[in-house]
Image: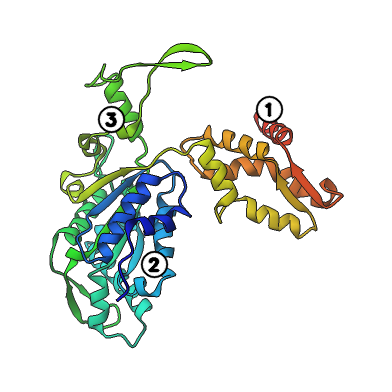
Amino acid sequence: MKKTPSPAAIAAVLSSKVIGQEVAVRDMAVALAKKLAGIDAGNLLLIGASGTGKTTLMRAVEDYFGTDLELSRRSTLIRVHANVLAEEAESGFAGESLLQSLYEKAREDLGSEASVEEVLGRIEHGIVFVDEVDKIRGRLGETVHVPGIRAQEALLTLIENQAVSFQLPDGGDTTVTVDSRGLLFVCAGAFEGLYDAVYDRVTIGRDRGSLKPVTVVKNGKVQQKTVFTLSEWLRTDDLFDYGMTPQFLSRFDAVVLLNDLTEEDLEEIFLETPDSAIHPARAYFESFGVDLSLTPEAVNRIAVEAVSYPRLGARALKEVFRRVVREYEYEPEATSPEGRLVIDREQVEEMLSKKKSGR
């Protein structure tokens, strides 16, 4: 059997696709290395604003396993949306449905010739990504959210139980039992409102006065500034108040907070990542015989504008770039008679100002 890759080796691969989230990448890499070594890895809960890279990290892990045949034989990965779990929990079959999804993916990976025992062995060492887990919170304001509680309980059944029964999707009425102790769960969510709730707690709530101003020097002037970061002030009780049950949270060995993306992160994402809006834009202009490029100053201005929308993260790049390029897209050849379009900072400023002025 191939030697288990080190966390550093795994992180190097993941980091090529996930930018600005070194801590989350390292924690994921350690969990995967333990998992591949057959050691209890401990479940992870990822918390980060929309667009910071939670789903990107999950996809990077999927790609990592999918491109290495030896690794793919050692574990089966599936990704499910928490809302789907909540809907299935209403019927009481969320746990069984998740195992069936694992079974179908393992069967797909191993092929039709694999025995049921081989497929079940892959399931018992599977990795389950649950996206938007904050959607199964057990409380919405002051109202109890029953579907969310049921979905959390369904996941707990798989996380806690040693033996879980389900009906084989391709086995007629055959029911099998799976030892679910070996499953690794990685749950992720934006947890909208959590930042504000924790900030209020330390500024105007029960811990008022805990957040102290610090002295900073800016432009040669000494100033008092209040610095708040969720990673420093988040407590488990805040997640209880949000609607995650104590029983559910106790099954996660680590709660990992993703960073807000910086201007530098966004510039790198815009230029280097495969799903950046710059790539289809270049292909579009190329189809008209036009070479599209942006000056470094133009890219920086786009990143500066995008970072002003922290709740969108990297997704803000696409909207900002669309505002910059859309007028050029209407008549590509007319705007680039020499077959070359170079967008500079001044042009970016002009296009962004049109949006702000309503033109």
The colour scheme applied to this rendered structure is rainbow
Name the residue furthest bottom: 113
- From mark 3 to mark 1, how far is it between C-alphas? 39 Å
* Pointer 1 with pointer 2, Cβ within 8 A: no
The quarter of the displayed image where residue 119 is located: bottom left
On screen, residue 238 above or below 177: above
Spot occupied by residue 27 in the image (x, y as percentages of width and height): 31, 50
Dot 3: what SS? helix
- From mark 3 to mark 2, how far is it between C-alphas? 35 Å
Q: Is residue 88 visible?
A: no
Name the residue furthest right: 337
Spot occupied by residue 23 in the image (x, y as percentages of width and height): 35, 45
Relative depth, front residue between 324 and 43? 43
The label shown at residue 65 is 2
Mark 3 or mark 2: which comes first in sequence?
Answer: 2
Spot occupied by residue 72 in the image (x, y as percentages of width and height): 36, 72
* Pointer 3 with pointer 1, Cβ within 8 A: no
Name the residue furthest left: 162
In the picture, measured across the screen, residue 75 lies left or right of residue 173, that is: right
Which amino acid is tagged 3?
Trp
Question: Residue at label 3?
Answer: 233
- For the point 27% across and 33% down, the residue is 234
Q: Nearer the viewer, mark 3 or mark 2?
A: 2
Which amino acid is tagged 2?
Phe
The quarter of the displayed image where residue 83 is located: bottom left
The label shown at residue 357 is 1
Spot occupied by residue 213 in the image (x, y as percentages of width and height): 35, 16
Dot 2: what SS? helix
Q: Is residue 321 visible?
A: yes
